[in-house]
Image: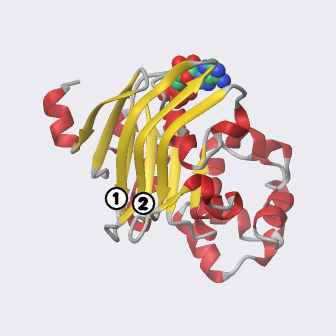
Amino acid sequence: MDKDKIIEIKDLSVYINSQRLLNDINLEISKNEILLIYGPRNAGKSLLARSIVTLNEELFKNIQTTGQILFLGEDVNHIEKRYLRSEIAYSEPTFVDNINFLTLSEVFNLVLGIKPSEISHEQFILLEKLNIAHIFSNHSSLKSYESFWNWTIGDKISFIIFLSLVRNPQVFIFDSILDHLDDFMHKNIKDFLYDIKEDRSLIISTRNLSLFSDIAEKIVFLDQGEIVYKGSIEGFLLNFPL
Ligand SMILES: Nc1ncnc2c1ncn2[C@@H]1O[C@H](COP(=O)(O)OP(=O)(O)OP(=O)(O)O)[C@@H](O)[C@H]1O
């Protein structure tokens, strides 16, 4: 196997209630690569992204999958789920809403096993790069941010990226979650993602091509469950001028 190949998707089709929603998907993702999964609403972006971490089967009844997905050469269905999901960090927009039902201390305890006041120097630097270190700077700000209802959406997205990163996964999947960033946060997060892609792979699913096209190496254009184009961004823009 090519040592830089992290994920291989081979002849993947997904059916729900016998309706084919992903059709014969073939795709490879390598180390140091940012891949955009681009397409309109209902194209199948989320089904494809969740297939990589075997999540669809947990969410839907009457789902059938054919084909195979390999993570570092091993079938994802044969990999222990906890391990798979620590190596491939998947995040999507419902996380931003669901986190409101926990407190900051509860999330820290669940994910990192520490209190928010116990973060390391390295973790604080990461928070600084994500522009949310002010929340952790002293006892009174920690207190006022204990409830996520007091956080902006952008700060919550940055925090979700932080939580993924401290677990040091090999692959990040951002399923439409970055579409929710405003222009001011977008530039900072984009630079940050570009920095962390070294030795990792990033998969960004989006309905907004312009957001990340300048940092992505590869694009997959998905429509009605099929790959219509895969290759370079330049090639895509030539073939599908928007
Ligand atoms: N549980 C389900 N039962 C039946 N059909 C479903 C189910 N979940 C998704 N679908 C269908 O699968 C198709 C792909 O949905 P998916 O959520 O993957 O699209 P998407 O490209 O991520 O869309 P969006 O950009 O709106 O998030 C859609 O036609 C959707 O209606």
Q: Relative to 27, is 122 on the left or the right? A: right
| Residue 110 percent across, percent down from the top left | 82, 62
- Please, is residue 61 above or below residue 48 in the view? above
The residue identified by callout 2 is: 201
Q: Quadrant of the N terminus?
A: bottom left
Image quarter hosting the C terminus: top left
Q: Where residue 166 sits in the image (x, y, percent)?
A: 62, 70
Q: Of the residues shown, which amino acid type is indicated by label 1?
A: Glu
Q: Which residue is more in the foreground, 84 or 186?
A: 84
Tell me what residue is drawn at x 78 percent, y 47 percent: 148
Instruction: Find numbered disc 2 in the image and state the secondary structure of the residue it sits on.
Output: strand
> Which quarter of the figure has residue 220?
top left
Looking at the rendering, the quadrant in which ligand 1 lies is top right
Give residue 106's position: percent from left, percent from top.
Answer: 86, 59
- Left or right for 121, reference 210: right
Q: Does residue 228 lie above or below 172 as drawn?
A: above
Q: Say which residue appears at 64% left-offset and 18% top-offset.
A: 17
Q: Secondary structure at mark 1?
A: strand
